[in-house]
Amino acid sequence: MAEDRKPKIDLKSRLQKMGGPAATPGPVAPPGMGSVPAPAMTPPPGGVRGGPGLTPVPPPPSAPPGMPRAPAMQHAAPPGMMHPGHAASPMAPAMMPAAQARQALPQAQVIEVDEGAVQQARSGGFKKGLIAGIVVAAGLAALGWVGGIAKANADAHSKGVSDAHDLSGDLGKAKESLGQLAQKLQDGQKTLGDRKFPSDLAQQLAGLNVDFGGDKLFGRRFSGVPADTTRQLFDFITRVQTLNDKKDLVIALLNKLQKPLTEELSRPAGVPLISYVVVVDKDTYGPGSGAFLAPLTAPVSAEGLAGDLTFINPRSSGNVKLPRLQNEKIPKDGAAIAVIPSSFDKVCPSLTRGQIGQLGSSMNSLLQDINGQKAAEGGDAVTETKPGLADTAGTLADQLGKVN
């Protein structure tokens, strides 16, 4: 029981009181080298000298399998670690200082970087990257723009070729209509030359329409079409519109003049109709007197002038009948003198006769527009050859059909 009452001595506390350093933890092993146990102070044989009751320090445990084992470090005890009253003993445990132990291990290298330089480099890299991105985006946009323009031009050219071929077909149809119109007009003129009225001509002309107006160019493209062809095409449209206007005028005149023309054409050729007479009587030669002009109630030929002539009373209303004056002596009751039609038309042109003349002129103009006008020399002026609409339509149809 004497051993139970024996006081226990705390070696760590005693060492601190003696001025020695506390147990220093072993150095930390660098990454990858494994754990190395802290060096243990190996007591001399027989225990630690310096005082009774010291507990012997057991040897360090062996390293686990697979772990590197630190070599045994023997170093001399630093000053102050010897027992008071004893000299330095060669049996004291040899201890290597901690600084030397740390120097023996490989040290990690620390690289210091200026934070301002890092930020400046990042800023410069960002700007360069942004500029490069903008340049690349601009290049891609330029390529897309060029590609888009190329595709748009290709599409426009393709549509221009298709439109040119469509117009070529329409011009071919217009040429056929022009030929039919010219044939109907020529047939009508022949009928009139035979002193017959072409009663069905107006209806036939109304059924023929040269369908090539300005609407044919709506939405069309002219890519690949020569400029001269385009100019001729616009001129052709203008001329066709004028032709259709003339045709409508001919149709209106035929409908209006059917009756007077039929009556005039029913007479033998070269026999004019007398429509007016001059009335003379006993007062014709008196002071302030003169003859009267009066229209016949119905036109008569030269053969009908042998008998009496009935005319509208120029002095009052109603009709009057007088004999035709046949000698220089004026009958007591008066007489009527026939007026030559050509002289009267020059002084007082008849509306009907003017319309008849306009009809013939319009028909001739239509045929000239369709068939063209040949060069003719007259006096000092020389008329140039002008192609007709039929030939122009054929030429334009060929040119537009060759567009590719």
Image: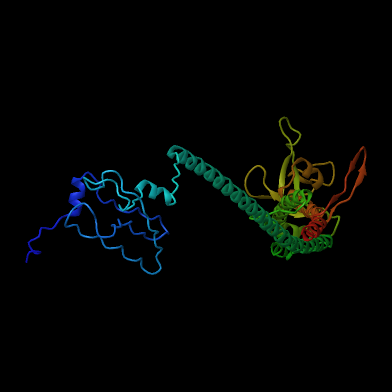
**Number of numbered discs:** 0
Report which quarter residue 259 is drawn in: bottom right
Q: Nearer the viewer, residue 14 or 346?
A: 14
Q: Nearer the viewer, residue 17 or 170?
A: 17
Quarter of the image with the N terminus in it: bottom left
User: Which residue lies at the image location 44% right of the left edge and 39% below the top edge?
Assistant: 114
Horizontal and vertical percent for residue 134? 55, 45
Residue 220 appearing in the image: no
Left of 102 or right of it: where is 197? right
Q: Nearer the viewer, residue 254 or 52?
A: 52
Horizontal and vertical percent for residue 356? 75, 52
Q: Nearer the viewer, residue 57 or 240?
A: 57
User: Which residue lies at the image location 45% right of the left edge and 47% below the top edge?
Assistant: 109
Q: Residue furthest top?
A: 287
Horizontal and vertical percent for residue 128? 54, 43
Horizontal and vertical percent for residue 274? 78, 51
Quarter of the image with the C terminus in it: bottom right
Rendering colour mode:
rainbow
Residue 223 appearing in the image: yes
Q: Residue furthest bottom?
A: 65
User: Which residue lies at the image location 36% right of the left edge and 59% below the top edge?
Assistant: 36
Q: Is residue 285 above or below residue 138?
A: above
